[in-house]
Amino acid sequence: MSVALFTLGGTIAMAGHGPGRDGGTVVARLSGADLTAAVPRLADVGVPLEVQDIEAVPSARLTFARILDLVRRASDAVRDGAHGIVVTQGTDTLEETAFLADLLWPHDEPFVMTGAMRNPTLAGPDGPANLLAAAHVAAAPQARGLGALVVMNDEIHAARWVRKAHSASTGAFVSPNAGPIGSVYEGRVGVHGGVPRRAPVEVDAAALAGVRVGFHTVVLDDDPSMMNAEGCDGFVVAGFGVGHVPPAFAPILGDLTQRMPVVLASRTGAGPVLRGTYGAVGSETDLQRRGLINAGMLDPYKARVLLRVMLAAGAGRDGVAAAFAERG
Ligand code: ASP
């Protein structure tokens, strides 16, 4: 029995350049061996961690293609006998990469992602504790069949719900609609929830590379000329509240649905886009009547991930609408 550890960089893997460079800033350069060496009592997990260093980058540099490649490598590790996967990466894009991995992951073995908010040069870095907890979860039978998980700050979050909701706190990761689905204390993994698993989506990198999804968040007194869907195959609009936009956007978005799937999400970060409460021009009811697809409880960033993956998988408007009805 083993756990496969894949490293992608991020704050958890950061260290200084050396004296005199950039006023003491840090860059991602630690290896998996460095990370595991910094974890006290890693042996308590009871299984070896087989390390594969992929790259050491800030997570703003990650791509859909990289996550596709990661899922392929992790699948190979499972086929070679790994009982779980741990991935370390930067926290900035973790809510998106975890959801993408969750859509693709075809195995029961836990796919556990983690990172750190305080880099190893600071007092009280959280990386070692997060990595230890993630390893415990990856090795835990009770985490099987839950898809991709994010383990931070002793909490287990479903990729479906998790958000980074603070720029600096070690408690940055939350699941506003559902709460964490479990916890890790003294190495014991407790799971008290989960998200129903759906069939994995199959996409290839070339198809994903060819799909462009536009994105616009509406703001007070917004100007539709600021919204650009040129060259896009699909579009996500992050509306106010339960799914509203300024009236001038409504006909433009309606016209856009004639050319591509347009998904309506809420910019609030929690709660649903409603289906039939408000009736004004630019309301959720009006926009759905004009052909926009309701994102349900999926936040705009995850909606963008799902839309791009479904388009790359060959879905048309109906297929996209069905995916949001099922997963939104
Ligand atoms: N900027 C860093 C990154 O996402 C932040 C982190 O890792 O926490 O790579």
Image: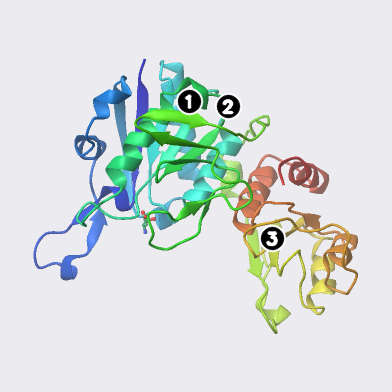
What's the CA distance linking mark 2 and mark 1?
A: 8 Å
User: Mark 1 is on which residue type?
Assistant: Ser
User: Mark 2 is on which residue type?
Assistant: Pro
Mark carried by residue 75: 1
Give the SS element for disc 3: strand
At horizontal 64% and vertical 56% (from top left) the residue drawn is 299
Mark carried by residue 236: 3
Give the total of numbered labels.
Answer: 3
Q: On the picture, is 68 further left or further right than 308?
A: left
* Badge 2 or badge 1: first in the primary sequence: 1
- Is the residue under label 1 in contact with that under label 2 (CB below 8 Å)? yes
Give the SS element for disc 1: helix
Q: Nearer the viewer, residue 229 or 269?
A: 269
User: Mark 3 is on which residue type?
Assistant: Val
Q: Nearer the viewer, residue 137 or 308?
A: 137
User: What is the image's colouring?
Assistant: rainbow
Residue 64 at least partly seen? no
At horizontal 76% and vertical 40% (from top left) the residue drawn is 326
